[in-house]
Image (cartoon, coloured by chain):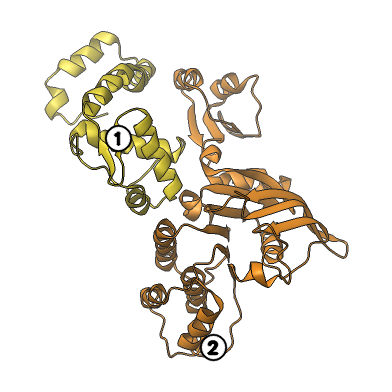
Amino acid sequence: MTPTISATALGRRYRDQVALDDISLTIETGTITGLLGRNGAGKTTLLRILSGLEFPTAGDIRVFGQRPAENEAVLRRMVFVREEQPYPDFCVGAVIRVASWFYPNWDRDLAERLLEDFELPARRRIKKLSRGMRSAVGIVIGLASRAELTLFDEPYAGLDAVARQLFYDRLLADFAAHPRTIVLSTHLIDEVADLLEHVVMLDHGRVVLDAPADDVRGSAVMVSGPATAVDEFVAGRSVWRRERLGTRASVTMPGPFDFAAQARARNLHVSVEPLSLQQLLVHTSGSSTDEMVSA
Amino acid sequence: MPALDDGTPLFVQIAEQLADEIVDGVLAEGARAPSTNELAAYYRINPATAAKGINLLVDETVLEKRRGIGMFVAAGAREQLRARRRKQFAEQYLDPMLAEAGRLGIDTDTLVSLIRGPGWHNGGKTS
């Protein structure tokens, strides 16, 4: 089966600024992929190219095997929910109705249920909605359109933790019942980590990680304990980062460890903890973040 | 949501939790196991991850697929899991305990008397 998305040496420049640099990746059909990275890493640019809003300045992009830009056949099959999506100033019900005309797989019942779940008043005008409610409108459209390819770009500005959980639960339930390809760009990484089957991490316009989520878990660990024991444990291994506080030390390094190494850690009284996806991003995202982690 | 720890792959943790229920007898032999989508919704994880966890138990013949109906706990699954866990007991439970005992200067005799002693059961000396 051809992957839903494939990018080959994709690049995007704005004058002298490089937004995307030599991006090559594929996103398989029927998966939930997390597109992760710091602000300015290139996530939104990539999504805009995927949805035909922008042209690449180098390389090639294929969605459903075709170039997406100005390609109605491709665009009909996808939905792109943007952060702070602008809507015409209709009432909520009218915006939803208009959206329903665009998407061939639109599910009216689902849309109505989601409107209730998010407590969106159908008669209120878009301009009178709070930021969170406007985000919820985007989420309703993104889910109810049931497009073969669903792109969410930080879809939850202004949504509180409860509403975000509602979004994750509804996303998961509808995905399970109607599998499709979903790309979720977010900086709330730890919240979505378990929803993801695949992870793509961008930094300064480049792909720094492209792997199944299962492989990423435990791929980096923090070893901490008495400095001498930690030094003894990590001797001869590659280490990403060292920190020291008095006689204690902690070291970030690639993992996971085999059973023998775990037993050795125990005997040396050093603790080994896996890095979360969020911590991994901080470590993978270049030297400028070092200050952020050395608290 | 029930807590899943970090570190070990999620699908392994899913398999372990199902195995726990089988060992405890909560999920009896011959009973229907939760479906992929039920697990995904309950643990709030990707359905593909849940499916991998179930497949792990299918490969170990703990679960068996009945076409069109779902996954069921295989006959003999409980004893099979118990036998395997007995083998792993020493390295999973005793080794860490002995390491901590050594750190605190608790010798083997003291350990044995702690395990045998009446204080263990009613004195609140857990972990």
Judge whether residue A294 can be spotted in this image.
Answer: no
User: Please, which residue is most extreme toward the front here?
Assistant: B67
Determine the CA span between mark 1 and mark 2. 55 Å
Say which of B70 and A276 sits in front: B70
Q: Chain of mark 2?
A: A
For residue B64, what is the image quadrant?
top left
Residue B98 is labelled as: none
Residue A229 image offset from top left, x and y in percent: 54, 21
Residue B13 image offset from top left, x and y in percent: 38, 37
At label 2, counting other C-alpha atoms closer than 10 Å, the crowd grade (few under 14, some 14-19, many 20 or more) is some
User: Please, which residue is most extreme toward the right here?
Assistant: A16
- The picture's colour for chain A is orange
Q: Residue at x 44, y 44 (%)?
A: B49
Q: Which residue is mark 2?
A: A127
For residue A178, what is the image quadrant?
bottom left
| Tag 1 and tag 2 share a subunit | no
What amino acid is labelled 1 in the image? Glu
The answer to whether A176 is drawn above or below residue B65 in the figure is below
Residue B64 is labelled as: 1
Count of numbered labels shown in the rendering:
2
Is residue A31 left or right of A237 when viewed as pictured? Answer: left
Chain in yellow, by letter, is B
Q: Chain of mark 1?
A: B
Residue A152 image offset from top left, x and y in percent: 57, 65
Local SS, label 1: strand
Q: Residue at x 47, y 20 (%)?
A: A259
User: Please, which residue is most extreme toward the top here?
Assistant: B109
Local SS, label 2: helix
The answer to whether A263 is drawn above or below residue A249 in the figure is above
What amino acid is labelled 2 in the image? Lys
Residue A97 image offset from top left, x and y in percent: 49, 84
